[in-house]
Image: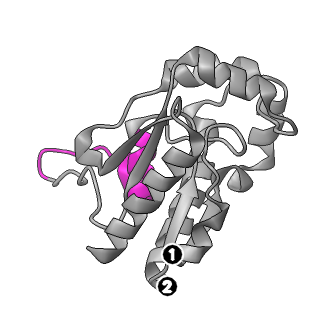
Amino acid sequence: MPVRKGTFLPDLEHIHTLGWRLHEGDDFHPQENIDKMSKGEPLTDQDRLPWLLRLHEVIESEMRSGSDALLTCSALKRLYRQILLHGSRALVPSCPDNATQPPNSPHIYFLFLHGDFELLNQRVLARKGHYMKADLLRSQFDDLEPPLEEENVLLLDVSRNISDIAMEVERHLISLKSS
């Protein structure tokens, strides 16, 4: 499900101890998106596109530098995840003559935090200081296209203990580093 600062993400602030940089996707939203969500208006695909392309640039920059990084964001749809992987190339419709973009990258993995609406709604209502209003959660559930196994994804149930989730993420990141 959506990953939002202070809501569904386990405490990964210590991720730097593993040598990984942490980027909060919400920090890359254009002001127009923040204003819209602050008014309780759901974002459209067009609203999200500049944000997703900025996140792709962050991923590309980290890959060029050879750094390991974790980027948190709500990549609700398969197309969004493809934009994170391939940037604007994901938007070019494939034709029979062209090879389609691969569904994954050997260097990029998705952590999919999922939970039922009631649990996530309670957490959104309990958080303080975030611009996304709780009534937007329903639109995120409506937009959600759960990732497929071929997308290099680790499924994480957010109803579990937060420290257990954080340990599982840490184990997964360590295993990626050693493979």
Q: Which residues are magenta?
A: 79-97
| Residue type of the residue flagged with mark 1 | Glu
How packed mark 1 is, by other alpha carbons closer than 10 Å (few <14, some 14-19, many 20 or more), is: some
The residue to which callout 1 is attached is: 62
Q: Work out whether residue 177 or residue 4 is closer to the camera in this orientation and state it.
A: 177
Q: Residue furthest bottom?
A: 65
Q: How is the image coloured?
A: one colour
- Distance (Cα) linking label 2 and label 1: 5 Å
Disc 2 marks which amino acid?
Answer: Ser
**Could you tell me what secondary structure mostly forms the magenta stretch?**
helix
Q: Position of residue 165 (x, y in %)?
A: 50, 46
Q: Please give left or right for residue 127 compared with residue 50 in the image.
A: right
Q: Position of residue 41 (x, y in %)?
A: 75, 23
162 left or right of 36?
left
Q: Position of residue 33 (x, y in %)?
A: 74, 40
Q: Helix, strand or loop at disc 1? A: helix
Q: Residue at (79%, 27%) from the top-left corner?
A: 126
Q: Which mark is residue 65?
A: 2
Residue 86 shows in the view: no
Q: How many marks?
A: 2
Q: Residue drawn 61% across and 15% down? A: 118
- When the figure is inspected, residue 94 is found, relative to residue 20, above or below; the finding is above
- 2 and 1 marks in contact (CB < 8 Å): yes
Is residue 170 within the magenta segment? no
Quarter of the image with the C terminus in it: bottom left
> Residue 63 falls in which quadrant of the image?
bottom left
Q: Residue furthest left?
A: 97
Rendered residue at 52%/69% (across/down): 69
SS at circle 2: helix
Say left or right for 137 vs 64.
right
Report if residue 87 lies within the magenta region.
yes
